[in-house]
Image: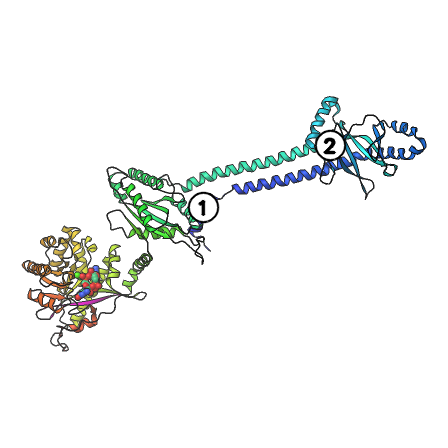
Amino acid sequence: MANTPKRKKNKVLKIVTKNHIWLTIVLCVIIAFYTALFVKLFSDVFSDYILNTKFMDEYEKVEYMSKLYDLNIDNNGENVYSLLNEEGRNYFISDNLGNVIYHHGEITMGENSGYISIPVSTNEEKKIKIYFDEETDGLFYSDEEGDLKPRPIGLLLFAVEFYEKSGIQDNLKKASIDLPMWMTYDVQGGKQTFNCRILFKISLMDGVFLVSFIVISVALVACIIVLLLVNMLNTLVNQKRLSKVFFTDPITRGHNWMWFSFRGEQLLKRKGSAKESYAVLDLVFVKFRNYCVCHSVIEGEEMLYRVDKIINQSLNKKEMAAHYASANFALLLKFKDREELRVRIQQIIDKLETIDKDHKFTFHVGVYVVENRKNAKGKPVRRKNIDIEREYNNACTARSTLEECDDSGIAFFDENLVEEQKWIDAVMERRRSAIENEEYIVYYQPKYDPKTNKLRGVEALIRWNSPDFGFKGPGSFIPILEKNGFIQDIDHYMITHVARDQKAWLDVGYECVPASVNVSRAHFSENDLAEQIRDAVDAEGCPRNLLEIELTESAFFDDKKAMIDTILKLKEYGFMVSMDDFGSGYSSLNSLKDMPLDILKLDAEFFRGDINGGRGEIVITEAIALAKSLNMLTVAEGVEFKEQVEFLASKGCDMIQGYFFAKPMPKEEYADKMNRKEGFEEKEETTISGEEPSEEKTVE
Ligand code: C2E
Ligand code: CA
Ligand code: CA
């Protein structure tokens, strides 16, 4: 499977944050443990070997003396002792009770004892009890099994002392230490004990070998451990340096998004608490670009640095924040209830708003609450499937709902926003194919003369017959396309199709009435708009006077001069131009003053609710009168009731477009409402007054 950018990023993060400490420590402990074990085993085996072999000679001597004693004691009596004395050893014979029967030389036997095993034959070992001499008591000890074991340090000290005293450093190779001890041997069938002082000779080379072995082993291990530790420190320093490069934001000098996403995911994956939840926030410094333009980019970045600082100062334990990009910051906050969270965010905003004494800044915050996961018993469990980029994106979606808002604000994310976003994406994605496949359909809503009930005009209104989403009204996609700057294509599509329909109807003898097409204000930024319309209509062979252009009122705000120029040109080319939704904004009158328009369309809002006798009636009356005095025709939109029609007729309104007469309808249905010229197939004149409004296809 191909490496996705996310996977690659995670790989890099793993390298940066990998924890080498534990690995090194564990390795050191293992090495130290096995070395100690090895040294212990080796020194045990080695010292056993020395003890056993060295004692062998002495044992044979003692055995000989004991046997000599046993053989001669009964016969020779006194003579046996002189024989034994010839051996030149200190010895004594004791009875079962420990009483000394005879002794030769001083009895310097110590109290402590231990056994050594001596191989008496290839398969057999004999355990001999050894008493330490007063001189050597403490250099050995007996283990749990009673076996004699050396104390290396004691022996070493003893050796040093011994050599200092004896001064035989000259021939070190042959030098040895004499350790006096006492060996015992049962005589007289076990009734007596023969105790003989023996000299245990340890050659210096043996000692040196053992000690050097231990010292070298320990030194080697120490070296390995030191090397490992140095390597670990090195890695740690490098890791720190690397993570600084990876995780530091160059503008705020604080943490960056990489750090936030990595640590944030770790934090969120931990088991949550039942009482506390986390929220991912997107905080944006609104109009940051304006600030940079008015001041400088450097000053702007300095502001971001201060914002980052303030945000970070407002954080509690186990919360985090980082600069995302541009003027956006990502935050991860803990909270108990939403109201508390809202108050906290507001406090942060309050602090940020006054970050500079000369300005009051605006901040928008989007909040996405990360749900706590619970098990069947209602206890919190680890959150899986954490994708902090997705959560942050949701917070951004919530924040984007504040885009039109000039003040600071907080918006929480809810699932509908995802649906909305998906819909926006779908509309944007399909806008081209919808045009290519002619999925956009023109509906027509007739306009009638309220006095004569005759058809006088028609408005073309778009519908989207989407193979994926069904039949959609303009309210669900036109604002999206307008906002994202893709309405020009729609306007062009509608003009072309309406012109084509009009031409086709003319050709088959219909008495066509002017059809109005909505042109969005965004389109007016193009200064050749009038030419575009003219050429499109001409290309279809439709007379220009059968097309009317409806300008929405808000269009008038953009560039008044360009607007007037376009209107004049449109009129010059033979099109009628109308002002849509008159009365729905606040500068309608002002606009009327300068705009050379043909038709005024009264906004449908006038006809919502009761207009009788109220201020609405006065406004409508005056608006119609005003239009008349400016030589403009009037169209009342959204008229649904007979009384409204009668009222408008009495005030001289020229046309009515509303459900009372007809809803927007497909072109075939609309064609039926038109009259045919003489000579063409005769058709019944449409009676309209009071007829049931035609049913529009259900628009979703
Ligand atoms: P608009 O231009 O003000 O169109 C009039 C809207 O009022 C139409 O809604 C129409 O169906 C509705 N209407 C008419 N009579 C009545 C009535 O008696 N009662 C009620 N409740 N409504 C009535 P529609 O077709 O949904 O269009 C909505 C808006 O979408 C239009 O408002 C226009 O701003 C925009 N639009 C529609 N088609 C196009 C188009 O082709 N291009 C552009 N740029 N915008 C369009
Ligand atoms: Ca309109
Ligand atoms: Ca309108």
Which residue carries the number 1 mark?
13
Secondary structure of the residue carrying numbered label 1? helix
For discs 2 and 1, the disc positioned in front in the rendered view: 2
Q: Is residue 26 visible?
A: yes
Residue 105 horizontal/vertical position (percent): 83, 25
Q: Number of labelled discs?
A: 2
> Residue 206: which numbered mark, if any?
2
Q: Three-letter amino acid code at disc 1?
A: Leu
Quadrant of the rendered image holding ligand 1: bottom left
Mark 1 crowdedness (10 Å alpha carbons): few <14, some 14-19, many ≥20: some
Q: Quadrant of residue 41?
A: top right
Residue 627 image position (x, y, % from top left): 8, 59
Residue nearest the observer in this picture, 294 or 365: 365
Residue type of the residue flagged with mark 2: Asp
Q: State the image quarter where residue 23 is shown.
A: top right
Please report the bounds of the magenta region as a residue range.
440-456
Q: Which mark is residue 454?
A: none
Indicate whether residue 400 is drawn in magenta. no
464 relative position to 69: left or right:
left
Taken as a whole, is the magenta stretch helix, strand or loop? Answer: strand
Is the CB–ligand 1 distance for label 1 below 8 Å? no
Camera-nearest residue between 577 and 353: 353
Q: Is residue 510 above or below residue 124?
A: below
- Spot occupied by residue 632 in the image (x, y as percentages of width and height): 8, 60
Q: Residue at x 51, y 37 (%)?
A: 233
Secondary structure under tag 2 reads helix
Mark 2 or 1, nearer chain start: 1
Residue 26 rendering spot, x and y as whole percentages: 56, 42
